Image: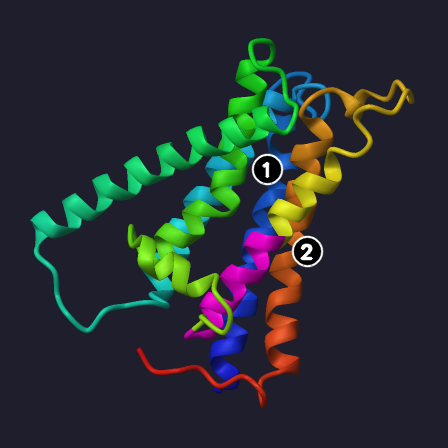
Amino acid sequence: MREAEIRRLLAANLLCAVSIILAALVPAFFLDGFSVLGTHLTWLCVCSVCVATLNIILHLVLKPSQSPKRSSFAHKISRFLKCCIYFFMSCILFHAIIVLYGAPLIESVTETFLFAVLLSTFTTLQCLCLLGPNVQAWIRVFSKNGAMSIWESSLQITTVCSILGAWFGAFPIPLDWDRPWQVWPISCSLGATFGYMAGLIIAPLWIHWNRKQLTYKSR
């Protein structure tokens, strides 16, 4: 396993983590009264857009899963449209799952959907960038020993950390502490964000630590 590839992964993940920090700080210079807690819905939109944009740019620049075959322009358009449909379906699916886990069904629909968009950005968008709209490849990556590259290993770790972070973030909501961050879905979205950032840092470190044990099968 090449050290240069691990360094590329680390640099890309650090950029994603920095984009989240900037998404929490920079808008305050342009939007009056902006804060992560006070204007949480605005922050959800800004954070999702920033992370999504950077992930797409990094994928186009680094090309971690570049195919040796050249595809036609029509195929690229079709692939792009499929990715958009998959992302929207992911948002709907996450929204439904969040409601089944206890989120308000009718009230706070906007809050729940934007939280679902954030989760999709942290998870599904990465799958689309790395693997494309290929469900079989997604199933392979998230099966035991299914990763075929360090980028896929990083995808596994960041996705799991994001979902676990969102789950742990729900614990404080029913407690009677009357804190502003207990309002739905602040603690869950912050938990998902911290989990995603933790996964971004943990992934390259774990891969570097276990680089001698990791043997990826050829595609």
Kind of residue sitting beneath label 1: Ala
Q: In the displayed image of the protein, which residue is found farthest to the top?
A: 107
Kindly tell me whether residue 30 is visible in this rendering.
no
Determine the secondary structure under disc 1.
Answer: helix
Residue 83: quarter of image: top left
Label 1: few (<14), some or many (≥20) within 10 Å? many
Work out which quarter of the rendered image holds the C terminus and state it.
bottom left
* Viewer-proximal residue among 96 and 55: 96
Q: What range of the chain is rendered magenta?
A: 148-160
Q: In the displayed image of the protein, which residue is found farthest to the right?
A: 177
User: Left or right: where does residue 23 sit relative to residue 171?
Assistant: left
User: Left or right: where does residue 88 sit relative to residue 8?
Assistant: left
Kind of residue sitting beneath label 2: Ala
Q: Residue 198 — which label?
A: 2
The residue at 53%/35% (across/down) is 118
Q: Marks 2/1: CA distance?
A: 17 Å
Please determine whether, in this image, residue 132 is positioned above or below residue 69: above
The residue at 73%/33% (across/down) is 170
Please determine whether, in this image, residue 88 is positioned above or below residue 76: above
The residue at 34%/82% (across/down) is 218
> Reading the chain from its start, which is encountered first: label 2 or label 1?
1
Kindly tell me whether residue 63 is visible in this rendering.
yes
User: Dot 1 corresponds to which residue?
Assistant: 23
Q: Residue 178: horizontal and vertical position, in percent?
A: 88, 18
Q: Residue 34: horizontal and vertical position, in percent?
A: 66, 22
* Viewer-proximal residue among 81 and 217: 217
Q: Residue 156: horizontal and vertical position, in percent?
A: 53, 61
